């Protein structure tokens, strides 16, 4: 199985450079890596990375937005995968602040080779800084991967393979049969919240998805490059409703997701928790609720608030 990688980045050139270092240490080297930014500062300094000099990594610019940038990466891979059977390669999407274990790609390749009906993999996240104030440091990421720090509790913690209905966007791999046929929904703008669930749901028509514990990594949860609190709060309502109407998310999942986030934003606003912009998120929730009642709700309206 041949491995390819797409990295969409926004405002995190330094973090992306470090990720490219990690990819050079993979025991199963990727055939090609595509880094997609939205402006020059997103990829500043990356041309100096050794993998770019050797031609193993290419850098390009696309319109800003996670789904747009990932789609641009998939299109760029066409020339590198044109002569390959779709069943014999896979593409992995890493967030620019994800730090994979050295055998992440090798583990995914073994699983894909062993099970020809397997079309999607997400890994075991040893620590996830998304919900913390400062995220996970680079030094701590190394410690988690080396085993000198025990893994933190996470929904992806597992000791055996588990079937999945959705994959975690910070580290997910898809067989070429999926990558050739599907693109990310560009109606989910900017940070693209729940774009991973939508893509995964559509990928299941080609086969099954799993959580593979041997694909280990750390998600730093770097805060730079994120969208505004108000816009993200709007997406917390607009995106699940959009996916519900589209048919890639059940009403139970959409309701649970929206309720959980609105309550969390309300409580953390009242408690004045400073980790994230919870007042902004709550305001975005309210604007989206108003748009839902007026019939104007759509993910792309997040651009206008």
Image: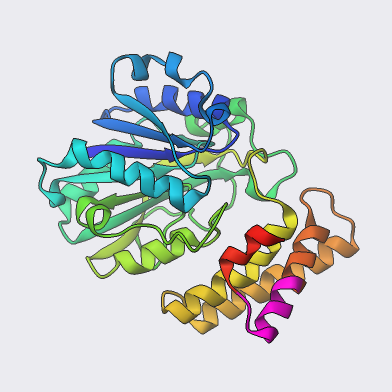
Quarter residue 24 falls in: top left
142 lies left or right of 83: right
**Residue at image location 48% in from the left, 74% down from the top:** 243
> Left or right: where does residue 138 sit relative to residue 178?
right
Q: Position of residue 211 (x, y in %)?
A: 38, 56
Residue 166, percent from left and from top:
42, 64
- Residue 272 percent across, percent down from the top left: 89, 56
Residue 136 in view, yes or no: yes
300 left or right, relative to 273: left
The vertical placement of 146 against 158, above or below, is above
Which of 20 and 10 lies nearest the eye of the viewer?
10
* 79 inside magenta stretch: no
**From what the image shows, is residue 129 above or below residue 260?**
above
Q: Quadrant of the C terminus?
A: bottom right
291 or 263: nearer the viewer:
291
Residue at the spot x=35%, y=19% of the render?
51
Question: Magenta segment: does it hold 295?
Answer: yes
User: Magenta residues: mostly which secondary structure?
Assistant: helix
Per the rendered image, the range of residues in magenta is: 287-297
Image spot of residue 303 (x, y percent)? 64, 58
């Amino acid at each position: 199985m041949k491995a390819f990688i797409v990295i969409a980045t926004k405002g995190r050139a330094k973090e992306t450079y470090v990720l490219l270092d990690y990819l050079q240490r993979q025991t199963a080297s990727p055939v090609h890596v595509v880094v997609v930014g939205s402006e020059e500062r997103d990829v500043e300094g990356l041309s100096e990375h050794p993998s770019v000099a050797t031609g193993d990594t290419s850098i390009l610019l696309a319109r800003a937005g996670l789904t747009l940038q990932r789609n641009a990466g998939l299109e760029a891979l066409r020339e590198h995968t044109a002569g390959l059977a779709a069943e014999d390669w896979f593409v992995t999407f890493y967030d620019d602040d994800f730090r994979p274990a050295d055998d992440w790609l090798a583990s995914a390749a073994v699983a894909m080779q062993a099970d020809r009906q397997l079309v999607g993999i997400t890994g075991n996240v040893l620590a996830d800084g998304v919900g913390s104030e400062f995220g996970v440091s680079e030094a701590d990421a190394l410690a988690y991967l080396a085993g000198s720090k025990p893994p933190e509790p996470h929904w992806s913690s597992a000791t055996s393979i588990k079937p999945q209905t959705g994959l975690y966007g910070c580290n997910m791999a898809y067989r070429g049969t999926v990558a050739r046929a599907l693109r990310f929904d560009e109606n989910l703008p900017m940070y693209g919240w729940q774009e991973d669930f939508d893509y995964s749901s559509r990928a299941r028509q080609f086969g099954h998805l799993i959580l593979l514990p041997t694909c280990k990594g750390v998600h730093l949860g770097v805060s730079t490059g994120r969208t505004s609190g108000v816009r993200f709060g709007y997406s917390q309502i607009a995106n699940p409703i959009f996916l519900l109407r589209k048919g890639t998310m059940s009403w139970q999942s959409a309701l649970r997701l929206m309720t959980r986030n609105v309550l969390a934003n309300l409580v953390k606003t009242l408690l004045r928790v400073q980790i994230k912009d919870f007042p902004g998120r709550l305001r975005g929730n309210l604007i989206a609720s108003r748009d839902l009642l007026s019939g104007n709700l759509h993910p792309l309206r997040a651009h206008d608030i």
